[in-house]
Amino acid sequence: MLSPRIAGLRQHQGVTVGKAVWPAIISQETHERLKVLLADPARQLNGGKLARSYLLTGFLYCGVCGQRLVARPRDDGRRRYVCASGVNFNGCGKIHRLAEPVEELVREQLFAALDSQDWNDALQAATHAADTAKTRERELLAALKADEAALDHAERAHFIERDLDGRPVLSRPRFLRLKRELEASMEGTRRKLAKTISGQALGSFPKGGEELRAAWAAGSLSWRRALLATYVDRVILRPCLKGRNKFDPTKVKVVWRV
């Protein structure tokens, strides 16, 4: 799904360099949106069977060392998030929480936020900003297409077109320099485009009330995670008091995107 080939684009050494000779299956605009959506770490399940049953994989961070928490069930099989330490892990090992209370708290905070008038006002402002971003998106796509056309022209001038002496119209040193400049410009434009597109997801889901709760109840795990990723940047789990086994909601901090 991330391959530029399906959008009718060519790649060279991992860099998209221009139009391909084969027809596109999807538009370039759709391709850029797919890259933003599918490459977002918060929307990925981190692979494996465990992650398929964990709502907050990729969202949770340790409040002590700042590392991302992982899914790791207890010996009795109950689902749990932990700050993993040891081989292949960089965490401190000081945070571990049962999954259900944290997931329920984050869900209810999301519902409460989307039900509030202050949040609705913030969403309306974000929606207005998204409308402005659409214009910016069109400008960036036009710049991207212009660079691709310039690269196509340079390739023809170097590889195909010849002067009266049979030499390439565009010399190799000039072609390579121009190619590097255009590829750097295209990658920079794509980064700006990704940032612009990612800001337009707000408002694409139910805003609150019974509609939201019904959609959540009926939605798949991936749909719920996509909803969370639209509004939640991360969730930080802070250390609890030693010897206290009861879940403490004050040690859970939701960081919102809006």
Image: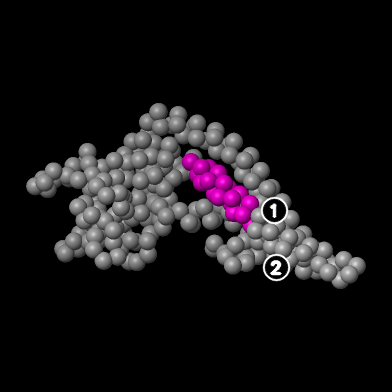
| Residue 6 screen position, x and y as percent | 62, 64
Magenta stretch mostly in which secondary structure? helix
Q: Amino acid at mark 2?
A: Trp
**Is residue 195 visible to us here?**
yes
Q: Amino acid at mark 1?
A: Asp
Count of residue discs: 2
Q: Quadrant of residue 181?
A: bottom right
Q: Is residue 3 above or below residue 222?
A: below
Q: Nearer the viewer, residue 176 or 92?
A: 176
- Residue highlighted by disc 1: 147
- Residue highlighted by disc 2: 22
Q: Nearer the viewer, residue 206 or 12?
A: 12
Q: Residue furthest right?
A: 164
Q: Is residue 60 left or right of residue 199?
A: left
Q: Which residues are magenta?
A: 183-202
Mark 1, secondary structure of its residue:
helix
Q: Is residue 203 above or below residue 59?
A: above
Name the residue located 39 percent from the left edge and 44 percent from the top edge: 233
Name the residue located 25 percent from the left edge and 59 percent from the top edge: 84
Name the residue located 43 percent from the left edge and 37 percent from the top edge: 258
| Front position among marks 2 and 1 | 1
Packing grade of label 2 (10 A; few <14, some 14-19, many >=20) is: few
